[in-house]
Amino acid sequence: SSQFFFSFVVLQWSVACMEILRMAVLGKFLLFRAMHTEKEARDMAEPEDQEFYGTGGRFARWSLNLVIGCIFCGVWPLVTLVTLVQFLLQRVAYGYLFAFAETKKADSGGEFWSESLSQLLYSMVLFAVGMCGFLLHRSSSIIPAAVAFVGVVIAVISVWQFQTGFRWRSLPIPEVVAIDRESLSKATQPDAGIYKHPALRDDSEI
Protein backbone atom coordinates (compact mmCIF):
# COMPACT_ATOMS: atom_id res chain seq x y z
CA SER A 1 0.00 0.00 0.00
CA SER A 2 2.85 2.40 0.74
CA GLN A 3 4.15 1.89 -2.82
CA PHE A 4 0.74 2.86 -4.19
CA PHE A 5 0.51 6.05 -2.16
CA PHE A 6 4.12 6.90 -3.00
CA SER A 7 3.24 6.73 -6.69
CA PHE A 8 0.03 8.67 -6.03
CA VAL A 9 1.87 11.59 -4.44
CA VAL A 10 4.47 11.64 -7.23
CA LEU A 11 1.62 11.77 -9.75
CA GLN A 12 0.25 14.82 -7.93
CA TRP A 13 3.36 16.74 -9.02
CA SER A 14 1.98 16.85 -12.55
CA VAL A 15 -1.45 17.97 -11.30
CA ALA A 16 0.04 21.03 -9.60
CA CYS A 17 1.90 21.92 -12.80
CA MET A 18 -1.16 21.35 -14.99
CA GLU A 19 -3.28 23.74 -12.93
CA ILE A 20 -0.97 26.59 -13.90
CA LEU A 21 -2.11 26.08 -17.51
CA ARG A 22 -5.78 26.50 -16.51
CA MET A 23 -6.83 24.32 -19.43
CA ALA A 24 -10.53 24.24 -18.48
CA VAL A 25 -10.75 28.03 -18.35
CA LEU A 26 -8.77 28.33 -21.57
CA GLY A 27 -11.08 25.88 -23.34
CA LYS A 28 -14.18 27.81 -22.25
CA PHE A 29 -12.57 31.08 -23.30
CA LEU A 30 -11.75 29.80 -26.79
CA LEU A 31 -15.27 28.40 -27.17
CA PHE A 32 -17.03 31.58 -26.07
CA ARG A 33 -14.71 33.81 -28.09
CA ALA A 34 -16.08 32.25 -31.27
CA MET A 35 -19.53 33.60 -30.41
CA HIS A 36 -18.83 36.68 -28.27
CA THR A 37 -16.32 39.46 -27.91
CA GLU A 38 -13.03 38.79 -26.16
CA LYS A 39 -14.09 40.64 -23.00
CA GLU A 40 -17.43 38.80 -22.84
CA ALA A 41 -15.69 35.48 -23.42
CA ARG A 42 -13.27 36.18 -20.60
CA ASP A 43 -16.10 37.09 -18.22
CA MET A 44 -18.03 33.97 -19.16
CA ALA A 45 -14.98 31.70 -18.74
CA GLU A 46 -14.31 32.94 -15.20
CA PRO A 47 -14.42 31.81 -12.49
CA GLU A 48 -13.18 28.25 -12.74
CA ASP A 49 -15.29 25.29 -11.59
CA GLN A 50 -15.64 25.82 -7.84
CA GLU A 51 -16.52 22.21 -7.11
CA PHE A 52 -13.03 21.10 -8.12
CA TYR A 53 -10.90 24.25 -8.32
CA GLY A 54 -12.63 26.05 -5.46
CA THR A 55 -11.11 26.66 -2.06
CA GLY A 56 -12.94 23.75 -0.43
CA GLY A 57 -11.96 21.22 -3.09
CA ARG A 58 -8.34 22.32 -3.04
CA PHE A 59 -8.14 22.20 0.73
CA ALA A 60 -9.56 18.67 0.65
CA ARG A 61 -6.90 17.49 -1.81
CA TRP A 62 -4.11 19.26 0.06
CA SER A 63 -5.25 17.70 3.31
CA LEU A 64 -5.29 14.27 1.68
CA ASN A 65 -1.70 14.68 0.48
CA LEU A 66 -0.57 15.83 3.91
CA VAL A 67 -2.37 12.93 5.61
CA ILE A 68 -0.66 10.46 3.26
CA GLY A 69 2.72 11.91 4.12
CA CYS A 70 2.04 11.82 7.86
CA ILE A 71 0.58 8.32 7.98
CA PHE A 72 3.15 6.53 5.82
CA CYS A 73 6.22 8.39 7.11
CA GLY A 74 6.80 5.69 9.72
CA VAL A 75 6.48 2.82 7.24
CA TRP A 76 8.38 4.31 4.31
CA PRO A 77 10.17 7.61 5.13
CA LEU A 78 10.69 8.38 1.44
CA VAL A 79 6.97 9.23 1.24
CA THR A 80 7.69 12.26 3.42
CA LEU A 81 10.25 13.53 0.90
CA VAL A 82 7.94 13.27 -2.12
CA THR A 83 5.14 14.91 -0.09
CA LEU A 84 7.47 17.81 0.71
CA VAL A 85 8.28 18.21 -2.98
CA GLN A 86 4.55 18.14 -3.73
CA PHE A 87 3.82 21.01 -1.36
CA LEU A 88 6.77 23.03 -2.65
CA LEU A 89 5.38 22.69 -6.17
CA GLN A 90 1.94 23.66 -4.93
CA ARG A 91 3.39 26.73 -3.22
CA VAL A 92 4.84 27.93 -6.52
CA ALA A 93 1.79 26.99 -8.62
CA TYR A 94 -0.95 28.36 -6.40
CA GLY A 95 1.11 31.34 -5.35
CA TYR A 96 1.05 32.40 -8.99
CA LEU A 97 -2.60 31.47 -9.56
CA PHE A 98 -3.95 33.29 -6.50
CA ALA A 99 -1.95 36.46 -7.09
CA PHE A 100 -1.92 36.86 -10.86
CA ALA A 101 -4.25 34.51 -12.75
CA GLU A 102 -7.48 33.68 -10.94
CA THR A 103 -10.30 35.95 -9.90
CA LYS A 104 -10.41 37.05 -6.28
CA LYS A 105 -12.26 34.69 -3.96
CA ALA A 106 -14.34 35.61 -0.94
CA ASP A 107 -12.70 34.98 2.43
CA SER A 108 -14.55 32.24 4.30
CA GLY A 109 -13.14 33.32 7.65
CA GLY A 110 -11.03 30.22 8.19
CA GLU A 111 -13.74 27.57 7.79
CA PHE A 112 -11.73 25.47 5.35
CA TRP A 113 -8.53 25.94 7.35
CA SER A 114 -10.19 24.72 10.54
CA GLU A 115 -11.73 21.74 8.76
CA SER A 116 -8.33 20.80 7.30
CA LEU A 117 -6.70 20.90 10.73
CA SER A 118 -9.52 18.78 12.11
CA GLN A 119 -9.03 16.17 9.37
CA LEU A 120 -5.29 16.16 10.04
CA LEU A 121 -5.87 15.48 13.73
CA TYR A 122 -8.27 12.66 12.91
CA SER A 123 -5.61 11.21 10.63
CA MET A 124 -3.15 11.28 13.54
CA VAL A 125 -5.55 9.03 15.45
CA LEU A 126 -5.56 6.70 12.46
CA PHE A 127 -1.77 6.88 12.29
CA ALA A 128 -1.39 6.00 15.98
CA VAL A 129 -3.80 3.07 15.69
CA GLY A 130 -2.02 1.85 12.56
CA MET A 131 1.37 1.99 14.25
CA CYS A 132 0.00 0.01 17.18
CA GLY A 133 -1.17 -2.69 14.79
CA PHE A 134 2.12 -2.56 12.87
CA LEU A 135 4.19 -3.02 16.03
CA LEU A 136 1.86 -5.72 17.32
CA HIS A 137 2.24 -7.63 14.07
CA ARG A 138 6.03 -7.24 13.72
CA SER A 139 7.10 -7.52 17.36
CA SER A 140 7.24 -10.72 19.34
CA SER A 141 6.13 -8.84 22.46
CA ILE A 142 3.08 -6.72 23.20
CA ILE A 143 5.13 -4.07 24.99
CA PRO A 144 5.99 -1.92 21.90
CA ALA A 145 2.33 -1.83 20.86
CA ALA A 146 1.28 -0.95 24.41
CA VAL A 147 3.75 1.94 24.49
CA ALA A 148 2.51 3.14 21.09
CA PHE A 149 -1.07 3.02 22.40
CA VAL A 150 -0.22 6.06 24.52
CA GLY A 151 -0.02 7.95 21.22
CA VAL A 152 -3.63 6.96 20.47
CA VAL A 153 -4.76 8.47 23.76
CA ILE A 154 -2.80 11.66 23.11
CA ALA A 155 -4.22 11.93 19.57
CA VAL A 156 -7.80 11.51 20.80
CA ILE A 157 -7.27 14.14 23.49
CA SER A 158 -5.83 16.51 20.86
CA VAL A 159 -8.93 16.09 18.71
CA TRP A 160 -11.19 16.77 21.68
CA GLN A 161 -9.23 19.86 22.70
CA PHE A 162 -9.30 21.22 19.16
CA GLN A 163 -13.05 20.73 18.86
CA THR A 164 -13.93 22.21 22.25
CA GLY A 165 -11.05 24.47 23.30
CA PHE A 166 -11.09 27.10 20.54
CA ARG A 167 -13.74 29.73 19.87
CA TRP A 168 -12.69 31.00 16.47
CA ARG A 169 -16.10 31.56 14.88
CA SER A 170 -17.05 34.40 17.23
CA LEU A 171 -15.26 36.63 19.72
CA PRO A 172 -15.98 36.44 23.45
CA ILE A 173 -18.31 39.16 24.77
CA PRO A 174 -15.58 40.98 26.80
CA GLU A 175 -13.41 41.32 23.70
CA VAL A 176 -16.35 42.60 21.64
CA VAL A 177 -17.10 45.23 24.31
CA ALA A 178 -13.43 46.29 24.43
CA ILE A 179 -13.33 46.65 20.64
CA ASP A 180 -16.54 48.72 20.64
CA ARG A 181 -15.18 51.01 23.33
CA GLU A 182 -11.92 51.50 21.46
CA SER A 183 -13.76 52.25 18.21
CA LEU A 184 -16.06 54.71 20.00
CA SER A 185 -13.13 56.53 21.63
CA LYS A 186 -11.35 56.86 18.30
CA ALA A 187 -14.50 58.14 16.62
CA THR A 188 -14.95 60.91 19.21
CA GLN A 189 -11.42 62.26 18.75
CA PRO A 190 -11.31 65.40 16.58
CA ASP A 191 -8.48 64.12 14.38
CA ALA A 192 -9.72 60.53 14.17
CA GLY A 193 -8.55 58.89 10.99
CA ILE A 194 -6.23 61.78 10.07
CA TYR A 195 -2.49 61.21 10.11
CA LYS A 196 -0.32 64.09 11.23
CA HIS A 197 3.45 63.94 11.27
CA PRO A 198 4.91 64.34 14.79
CA ALA A 199 6.96 67.33 13.66
CA LEU A 200 3.77 69.18 12.69
CA ARG A 201 1.90 68.55 15.94
CA ASP A 202 1.48 71.07 18.74
CA ASP A 203 3.00 70.47 22.15
CA SER A 204 -0.43 69.65 23.54
CA GLU A 205 -0.93 66.90 20.96
CA ILE A 206 2.33 65.09 21.72
Image: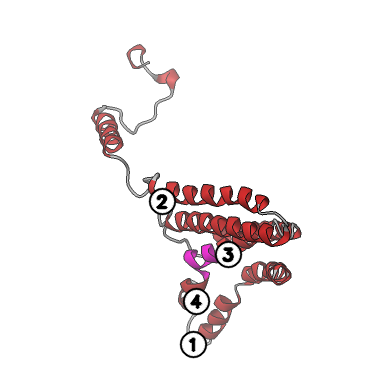
The span from disc 4 to disc 3 (Cα, nearest Å) is 29 Å
Mark with earlier residue (4, 3): 4
Answer few, some or many: residues within 10 Å of disc 3's Cα (few below 14, many 20 plus, some between 14 and 19). Answer: some
| Residue 89: percent from left, percent from top | 68, 60
Judging from the image, what secondary structure is the residue with disc 2 in?
helix
Quadrant where the N terminus is found in the figure: bottom right
| Residue of label 3 | 64
The span from disc 2 to disc 4 (Cα, nearest Å) is 39 Å
Q: Residue furthest top?
A: 203
Residue 124 visible, this orientation: yes
* Residue ID at (64%, 53%): 145
Image marks 1 and 4: residues in contact by CB distance under 8 Å = no
Judging from the image, what secondary structure is the residue with disc 3 in?
helix
Quadrant where the C terminus is found in the figure: top left
Tell which tag, 2 or 4, sits nearer the viewer.
2
Specify whether 1 is left or right of 57: right
Image marks 2 and 1: residues in contact by CB distance under 8 Å = no
The span from disc 2 to disc 1 (Cα, nearest Å) is 51 Å
Query: Type of residue at label 1?
Result: Met
Number of numbered discs: 4
| Residue of label 2 | 163
| Residue 90: percent from left, percent from top | 64, 60
Q: Which mark is residue 35?
A: 1
> Height in image: 197 above or below 146?
above
Query: Type of residue at label 3?
Result: Leu
Query: Type of residue at label 4?
Result: Ala
